[in-house]
Structures are given as C-alpha cells and as structure tokens.
Image: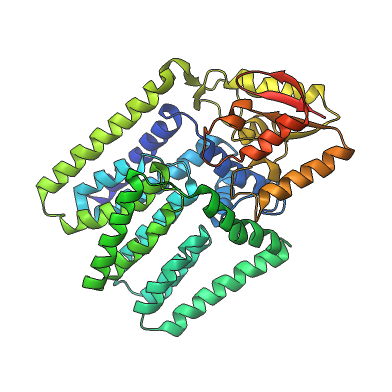
Amino acid sequence: MKKYQKIIVFICLVILTTIYTYYIRPIVDDELFNYGFAKNILEGLIPYKDFNMIIPPLFSYFLSFILAIFGKKLIVYHFVIATIITIITFLGYKTIKKSTIIIYILLLIYPYTGYNMFSLLLLFILLNIQEKKYTDILEPIIISMMILTKQSLAILMIPSIIYIKNKKKTISIYLVSGCLFLLYLIINNNIFEFIDYCILGMLDFTNKNTTQMNLLLIIEWMIILFLGYQTLKTKRKDIFYCLLFQIITFPIVDYVHFIISFIPVAYLVLLKFKKNNYICLLGTTAVISFFLALNTLIMVQEQNYLYLSHYKVNNFMKGRVTYNVTEDYVFNVKKYLDEYAEYHPYILGHFSYLIKLNNEIPINKYDIINNGNMGYHGEEKYLKEIDDYCKENKCIFIINDEEATISKTIQTNREILRYVKQTYYQKYSSNIFSVYTN
C-alpha cells in the first residue's frame, strides 16, 4: 500500500469508527466518566481531590489537551477513541497484514473505556518496537506511560527489567517517571487522596467486584495458562508482555474488560498463522458474525430500536444515540434542583455525570458511588460525610429507586441508595428517578 493510500484509508477508518461509536451504538456511562474527567481538569478541578477516579491521570490529561484544542464535545472523545483504534489497526497491519481486520472488529466491540484503549495502544507500540534502535530507552518510557494510565500495569516492569541488557538505565527511567508523578501529586496536594482512591481503594474494588465463575473467567484462566506455558517454552518477551497484560481484565471478567485483554492474544495467534489464509478467513468470518450478532442483540434487547434516537439538545452530546426519554429526564431533574435551590444536591447513581454534564452542574466526589471508586472503606466514609452534613444543612437527593433494589450494575453501591430511601422524605417518584429531601 502506497503512502497516500495509507493516509486515505487511515482517515476513512477514523471517520467510519467515529460514526459507528457515536451515531449507531447507544450511549454508555463509561464514555461520560472518561469525558467528564478530562472536562473537570480543563475547568480547574484536581483529580482525587475535587472528584474521584481510581486510575492515574495520564489519559485524562491527554484527553483534556485534545478537548482544549477541538472543543468540549463528546464527539471529540469518540474521535480520539477512533484514532486510537485506527492506529492499533495500522500497527497490526505492519506484521499480520490483512488479518488486522480481525483486530479492528474486536476493537469495536466495547471501545468506550478510553484509558483501557489507550493502554492497549501503548502495548501494541511496545510490541512493535522490539529489536528497534533505542529500545532500552523507549521500552521503559512506554511502560511508565502504561502505569500512569492504569496502575495495575506496573507488573509489566518485570519482563522489561529481566530482558533488557542495560538494567541500570531501565530502572533509572522508571525511577525518574515515578519521581515526576510524585512531584505532580505534591504540587497539587493530592498525594493522600491518590493513595486512598488508587491504591487502598483497590482493596475494596477487588473485594466487592470479584467476578463469580462464568464462561469468560474460565476462558481467561485457560489463556493465562497457555501464555504462561508459551512464555516458559519460548522465552519470548512479547508473549510475556501479553501474559501480564491479562491483569487488565481482573477483577471484573465481563466482555467489557475481557475483550481488551483478548485482543493482544488474538494478535499473537494471527502473527503465528499470518501466512495461513484459511485461519485468516475463519477468524474474520467468526468475528464479523459475532460483531453483527452483538449489534443485533443491543438493538433488540428490551426493544431498544423503539426507544433510541439521536439527542436533539444543542449541547456537548448533540447527535449522540441515546434513549428518547433522556432529554425530559435530565431537564426534569433540573426543575427539582431549581425548585430546591437552597438545598445542597446529591445526585447518586450511574446517571450522575449524564445529569450534571447536561445541566452544567459542578462535579464532585459523590457523583461516582461505584464499589471500589470511593477509596478505602469508602461506603462508610461517604455515608458518614453525607449524614454529618445533612444533619446541619438542607439536602436534596436524586436517585433511581430501582437501582437501589435491583442489581442493574455490579458496581453501584446500593447501600448508599438504600440509606437515602430509608432516611429522607420522598418528594417525587417515577420509574426513572426519585427525589428525596431532609
């Protein structure tokens, strides 16, 4: 493929991917959280201190830089994700040629957790710089970026230190990266909050979000055993990296997390059989079939095709595919918040960022009450803080009653929602949201 052809294909893939993720697939809370983190930073909020997140901030700062250039629009976030997907696809094309179509389709299954996609991009870059000049410098820099994107990926330092000849230089780069991040935390006076949310809080996250036995968990353990065996047998560093990258799927082994860790495994398999046209055809047919089935299921699930439309409000998410009731829902909430303007608002549940971003309400740490997202023993701390504040001040709560009783998600802390239902007075109730005050 000639250079100008690559440029044309690249641009077309970015556009097609953006159209698919923004105008075809319905909105999810992950994209609002990722977009919201970057927007918070642009508006001067400090991660961990002014709002809660459980990952290091590299991707959020990167995204905030892009939003500052192209505008604070949700479609810009999708454009960034589409660009990441396209770059990974092109990196795959360098080694597995036409089989990279399989990687591309797998990337489209759930691309909305931007920091995971960014980590995957860095892994593909890492796999592609092996045997290159200055690898001993580039490799620890890339892995440092991966750690500053998702802290669990610090485990990738192990093969880096084992295999690289100049260990002093490699370790020095890791130390410099760590010191620079520590300096960032000291300057922003959020070092203790970072430790609480991103280190100690992970104990709660793992304890409360551990996946029960399911098919994907069985497959994941089979993959780990296979990669472990191949690492010992071949001593190949790329396989070792892909083995340790599997940590990204834990502790929640669902299709959202599993697909990210599975893509590099698929890449290794396609690399092994890159000259086998039968494997390429079989794999392409399988992933296309699964992709079409997934999208069909999304549309027919609970008759979504009847309730989805493009968002008409001229704001940051204009044109995004969402539920028909979204506009009335988010602005009806605003009516109650305006009616009780002298009350301090708590918007609790998975829809908090949707409401706040649409109504331009400042974000705070109570907007994500997922298990493991509130720091160490966060449930107890959040309940005490809310209780202490609302004993002395007027408070209004917006929650979804059904979310408090039915496990719609495996992460939302339902104890906090139940506390609101049991402690405060209900002023309004519907199947979408309820209003409580003290």
Does residue 57 appear in this view?
no
Quadrant of the snapshot with the C terminus:
top right
Q: Where's residue 422, x and y in %?
A: 73, 31
Q: Nearer the viewer, residue 422 or 70?
A: 422
Q: How many marks?
A: 0
Q: Which of 53 and 373 is in front in this view?
A: 373
Q: At 51% across and 80% down in the image, what residue appears? A: 172
> In the picture shown, does residue 2 fall above or below 303?
below
Residue located 34% across and 29% down the image: 295
Query: Residue 164 at what x, y percent from top left?
Result: 36, 79
Relative to 225, is 23 above or below? above
Q: Residue at x 48, y 19 (%)?
A: 309
Q: Which residue is situated farthest in the top direction here?
A: 306
Q: Nearer the viewer, residue 375 or 364?
A: 375
Q: Tell me if 389 is positioned left or right of 111 in this view.
A: right
Which quadrant of the view contains residue 124?
Answer: bottom left
- The answer to whether residue 173 is seen in the rendering is yes
Residue 148 left/right relative to 269:
right
**In this picture, is 341 found above or below 158?**
above
Q: Where is residue 390 in the image (x, y as percent from the top left)?
A: 83, 38
Would you say 369 lies left or right of 218 here?
A: right
Residue 307, how many percent across, how many down? 47, 17
Residue extending furthest right?
392
Colouring scheme, one of rainbow, by chain, secondary structure, one colour = rainbow
Q: In this view, does 325 lie above or below 14?
A: above
